[in-house]
Image (cartoon, rainbow, N blue to C red):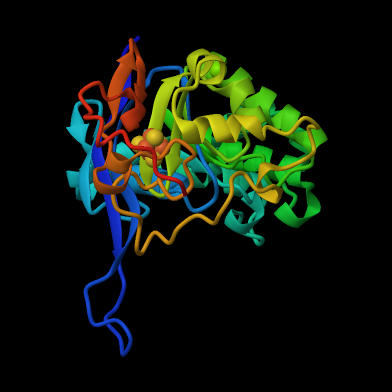
Amino acid sequence: NDVVLKVEHLTKHYPIKKGVFSKSDACVHALEDASFEVHRGETFAIVGESGCGKSTTGKCILRLTEPTSGEVILDGEDFTKLKGEDLTRARQKMKLIFQDPYSSLNPRMTVADIIAEPIDIAGTYKTRAERDARVEEIMQAVGLDLAFKYRYPHEFSGGQRQRIGIARAIVLEPEIVVCDEPVSALDVSVQAKVINLLEELQDKLGLSYIFISHDLSVVKHISDTVMVMYLGHTMELASKQELFDEPLHPYTKALLDVIPRIRHERIQDKKILQGDVPSPTNPPAGCVFHTRCQHCMKVCCDRAPEMREVKPGHKCACHLFDEGLTEEEKTPVSI
Ligand code: SF4
Ligand code: MG
């Protein structure tokens, strides 16, 4: 399976302005050293609680926010270094679907013009007829009635708006679509339809998805590979099968323990673990999860675990899988 996107050591720190109360150069550690590969035609899910760095990862990949360091290799080029026309051209290969499509749809534009905007800007078609034919083709592909062409976003339901957002995202035939909580704002009955549409389009167009979600039951359905994040750090990375059947990281296990039994419960409404997520401005030393981990050892408070391949294709950042620890380092610490 060929790699369509390779992310290397991607990091984002947001500086906090020096003020009366903070004299130091504090910063928010939003994303720390993320490395992963996305294969052509796969759905790569990024999961974790809100504020764990999922959206920051998506935004840094697309350069909606500039990463502090790291590389995003797209078709052999480092996307983070591109400028001018090269950047514009590369941007056509990666598109975004938002959580709330409505906020991203211009209320004064018709559905047809919204969907056509990317091809209008890119100047893809020479004639009006070709352009209109493409709009109709895409509307049909996403299940929008052609009678809606000259209507406005406010006339549509959430699910239909998301179809408009998807149509706009794929009209230029990108290679990668970053889907940031694409169904979280929708009713459960509509969620399944939009997920099915995304899968259908993936098969038809060979799209690769980076699927950002806090909802593990959705991720279990749609993903091929899953990366779990906590406080900006990557905790675990494995195939969906491995991650759900044989989770290794204590944080992943805790997340899986609270997968809602009833579909309409939302993880964000439940308390996943004891204690609050620490502030990303001042993350815990050592393993960032150690303040909430039931397996915390002495070493966890001092030294950050590295992301390592524990089983073939299954990576995890946790000292429980370090073989070289001393008895002293393994001393349990109660939290
Ligand atoms: Fe828990 Fe230590 Fe593993 Fe962190 S490194 S998850 S604190 S056992
Ligand atoms: Mg799929």
In the image shown, does 58 or 201 lie closer to the viewer? 58
Classify 220 as above or below 288. Answer: above
Image quadrant in which you'd find residue 289: top left
Q: Residue at x 67, y 46 (%)?
A: 111
x and y percentages locating residue 63 in the rendered image: 33, 49
Ligand 2 image-quadrant field: top right
Q: Residue at x 31, y 13 (%)?
A: 2
Image quadrant in which you'd find residue 70: top left
- Horizontal placement of 287 versus 160: left or right? left
Q: Residue at x 54, y 56 (%)?
A: 276
Asked whether residue 330 is in view, the answer is yes
- Horizontal placement of 77 versus 63: left or right? left
In the image shown, does 54 or 202 lie closer to the viewer? 54
x and y percentages locating residue 273 in the rendered image: 59, 45
In the image shown, does 126 or 233 lie closer to the viewer? 233
x and y percentages locating residue 226 in the rendered image: 47, 26
x and y percentages locating residue 138 in the rendered image: 61, 29
